[in-house]
Image (cartoon, rainbow, N blue to C red):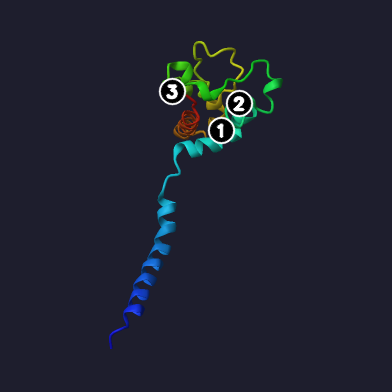
Amino acid sequence: MPQEPKKLWFSRVHWLVLCLIWLAPQTLWAQDPGKSVLGKHTYRSYCATCHGATGQGDGSIADMLNVKPSDLTVLAKNNNGEFPAERTRKIIDGREKVKGHGTGEMPAWGDAFQAISDDEEAVAEKIDQLVHFLESIQVE
């Protein structure tokens, strides 16, 4: 006995919805949230107290520091519109002195991250995530 068209439609929609409900979490779990998103979390944990929540150098302890923290939102603007990714990476890492970086007041995050994981690849990835985040907050 054939189903009524209304019931057949409901049945197909019902199965489609069930399939989407089953697939959606698997799709979301498989997606990479993106380096800048991960970098934002790292930034909040390690950088925001000095550089501020928005990266403008106005963190909660900025006034207590001998050297005012940099405004990280203008790195590209101060470099002829090009974000200096490699230089930024080296400055964050801090294990290799970068000419013109200043007094060395900023912590060497490469050492700090390595103390946590002791895996150079993981350290490089964490720094890379920070660099991607900083690139995402640049202003014109």
Which of the image's four quarters has the N terminus?
bottom left
- Decide: is 6 above or below 104: below
Q: Nearer the viewer, mark 3 or mark 1?
A: 3
Task: Residue type at mark 1: give it.
Answer: Tyr
How packed mark 2 is, by other alpha carbons closer than 10 Å (few <14, some 14-19, many 20 or more), is many
Instruction: Assign a secondary structure to mark 1.
Output: helix
Label 1 neighbour load within 10 Å: few <14, some 14-19, many 20+: many
- Choose between 82 and 45: the one closer to the eye: 82
Is residue 140 rendered to the left or right of residue 7? right
Secondary structure type for disc 2 = helix
Residue 126: image location, x then y, percent: 49, 33
Q: Which residue is mark 3?
A: 83
Q: How many marks?
A: 3
Residue annotated with mark 1: 43
Give amino acid for label 2.
His
Residue matched to label 2:
51
